[in-house]
Amino acid sequence: MIDHPAPNGLKRYLPEFVLVLVGALILFLPLSWSTTPHLIDFKPFWCAGRVLASGADPYRQEPLATCEFQASPPGFFRTDDRRLAVPAPFPPLTLAFFRIFSSLPYGLAAALWSAFLIVCSIIVVRVLSGMLELDPMTITACLALSLEYVSLNAGEIVPIALAAIVIAADAAARGKPTRAALAAGFACLSPNLALPAIAALMLGMPSCRLRLLVVLCVLAIVDFASGGFALTREYLREVLPAQASMSALGSTQFSTTSILAELGMPIQTALTLGSIWLLTMLGIGIFAGQRLAEITGRRELLVFIPTAFSVIGGPHVHIFQIAAAVPAALVLYCALPKFRRSLAVALMLLAVPWIYASFLGRLSTVCAIAVSAFLCLQFFRARPFIIAALSCGIGLALMLIASWIVVLPDVTTALARSSSPSALAQESWGAYLDATRSANAAILAWGRVPTWSALVILVFVALRATSAPRKGDEQFSD
């Protein structure tokens, strides 16, 4: 753990100011600055919570589609077709959490949800700042777009889960098993991110095991109580497989399954191999996390490394989850001076959500240029000319990609074939994706390359460093 003096005056609160400012710009700038409506994912989450509260099935086409079609505040998402349902592919436990917000009018719920995501982003930055000998603004720059921008724009749950995971890692480093177990349990609102953290704590922190078991039992009871055992069974047996199959050919996916499916492999085979890949990477990540914690003395890596490895491939990985790799890269950057240049490149690539940057409008492009210039200065102390050239290059690349984006085709016919009220929501949403997938597929494919490159660098450095001696060897000194 690193103790460094607190900044004086207003500079102490600069990260909070920046994150609040970014959030305000996302939500309040005119739509001409963004090509997508706000909170495109939160509307389905809010509706699913409302459907669950009414006693109906939140995973079915109706009444979910009718709720999502209802009016939203100007600039906020609503479906354009009553026959389209955007799924809320979370377990009943998470949907019960959204019931808290669904009891409020949508406009008020959206405002509170947005504020909550901003607060969680601030928590991630502040907890990491307490761990690392990095300027808090450097940490803020690494997470402002990769975590806050994309998740807040969509209304995603990732900042909440990542805040819980960062708190759990900090608790593990400080030897606080109860806090670690509670935080890991709260992260279960996003199960795919919580699983690696829970597995790592179970295997790497014996004092946490009993506490984790108690927390998981309580969560299971809450899950069953939220919608009954039948709803939990439906989620596990029907919703998860349908969501995985629907997303296999998703052009915004970073999963191993999507790569294999796009190369022509049958979807079920690609899903099986993606699941095997996830388990393999999780096992390697747990080993690497324990080894690196011993080598560097940074016990937070017990949690951060498996979490980072879990978003490298697998059956389903979206751009929102990629931010979970940033804490591991930041800790390794501080702990492994020998690999700092490679990790700096990885962090700069992870800091920009390349696959969405051009789709999120001019604000995203401006922010990407600013973040890249700032991180180039912080990590490489580059000359102003080099920074300016890099920033202009990134801006031109993003604007060029944006110029290639085409309008999505009409999906009326596709939805007409997929509008059964009793069907899973994945049926109509899958029909929509199938009808629009090819429109910008080439752009989205290239947009994934920088992020994949960063993840490869992170894995290479982490595995390469596991063969080093323990902390104190000259290999890890400046």
Image: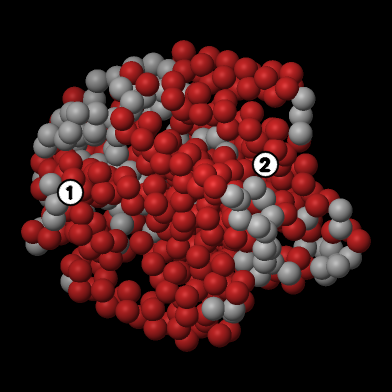
Q: Name the image quarter holding residue 75.
A: top left
Position of the N terminus, as image quadrant, is: bottom right
Q: Residues within 10 Å of mark 2 (few under 14, many from 20)?
A: many
Mark number for residue 47? 1
Type of amino acid at the residue the image marks with label 1: Cys
Q: Residue at x 55, y 35 (%)?
A: 352
Q: Residue at x 70, y 33 (%)?
A: 377
* Position in image of residue 388 (x %, y %): 67, 19
- Work out whether residue 279 or residue 304 is closer to the camera in this orientation and state it: 304
The secondary structure type at the circle numbered 1 is helix
Q: Is residue 207 above or below residue 291?
A: below
* Position in image of residue 80 (x %, y %): 18, 28
Looking at this rendering, what residue extends furthest in the front direction?
A: 9
Mark number for residue 346? 2
Residue 329 seen in render: no
Q: CA distance from mark 1 to mark 2?
A: 38 Å
- In this image, 415 relative to 8: left or right? left
Q: Is residue 335 above or below residue 259?
A: below
- Work out whether residue 377 or residue 255 is closer to the camera in this orientation and state it: 377
Residue 428 seen in render: yes
